[in-house]
Image (tube, helix red, strand yellow):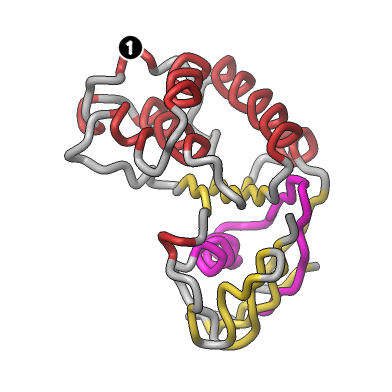
Amino acid sequence: MMLQVQISKKLSHFSLDVSFKVTDETVILFGPSGSGKTTILNCIAGLSVPDQGEILLNDTVLTKNHRSLVPAQKRRTGYVFQDYALFPHKTIVDNIRYGADDEYLVHHLLQMLNIHHLRSHYPQQISGGEKQRAALARALAAKPSVLLLDEPFSSLDETTKHHCQQELIRLKEEWKIPIILVTHDQKEAKQLGDRILQIEKGKLI
């Protein structure tokens, strides 16, 4: 797998202008809040469109200049949002099953992330950390071609965070897909990243 990103986009206080490639590795986007990290993830996922440039996954052009050529739902992008973005009308297990076709993997993720007992609950009935684990399980259950993680472990306790990080490392070895992880945590960046891209005011430094 090869993800190529070369995009520019005018934001409110600066212009985002980045170019990088990701193979079957974990690349960390590291930098202060408001530096453009989430905008990059949104452009890759097809939720935002750059002003110029292109995004390619292998030989498929996902986005070119100001046009999205592949809609978000067809990009096979696993995305863990900062605000979880779970479906409020679906139970936790149905949230995780969304886009999944491997019931064993769904069951394994429920156990691994310690949310099996919450499978029949709805998002409004569980805590923020539990929602984060459910969102991570949903992204992984779809067996994505690209995995985008926006501070996925920030509200987890240390034990669960360690388990999730170890599982992410294991899945990366097994699936061999590009993973882009946004974090403010330097220790996490060094532990999980094959490469760290530091970004400030929309530029890689």
Query: Residue 43 at x, y = what percent?
Result: 53, 69
Q: Considering only vertical position in the picture, is 17 above or below 116?
A: below
On the question of residue 154 being in view, the answer is yes
Q: Is residue 190 left or right of residue 161?
A: right
Amino acid at the residue labelled 1? His
Q: Residue at x 70, y 62 (%)?
A: 3
Q: Residue at x 36, y 34 (%)?
A: 97
Question: Looking at the figure, which quarter contains the N terminus?
Answer: bottom right
Q: Is residue 183 left or right of residue 172?
A: left
Q: Residue at x 43, y 34 (%)?
A: 132
Query: Residue 116 at x, y = what percent?
Result: 38, 14
Q: Quadrant of residue 91?
A: top left
Work out whether residue 145 or residue 112 is closer to the camera in this orientation and state it: 145
Q: Which residue is mark 1?
A: 117
Question: Please, what secondary structure does the residue beneath circle 1 have?
Answer: helix
Query: Residue 36 at x, y = what percent?
Result: 58, 67
Q: Which residues are magenta?
A: 17-45
Question: Looking at the figure, which quarter contains the C terminus?
Answer: bottom right
Q: Is residue 34 magenta?
A: yes
Q: Residue at x 77, y 48 (%)?
A: 24
On the question of residue 201 being in view, the answer is no
Q: Is residue 42 left or right of residue 122?
A: right
Query: Residue 171 at x, y = what percent?
Result: 67, 31
Q: Is residue 185 left or right of residue 148?
A: right
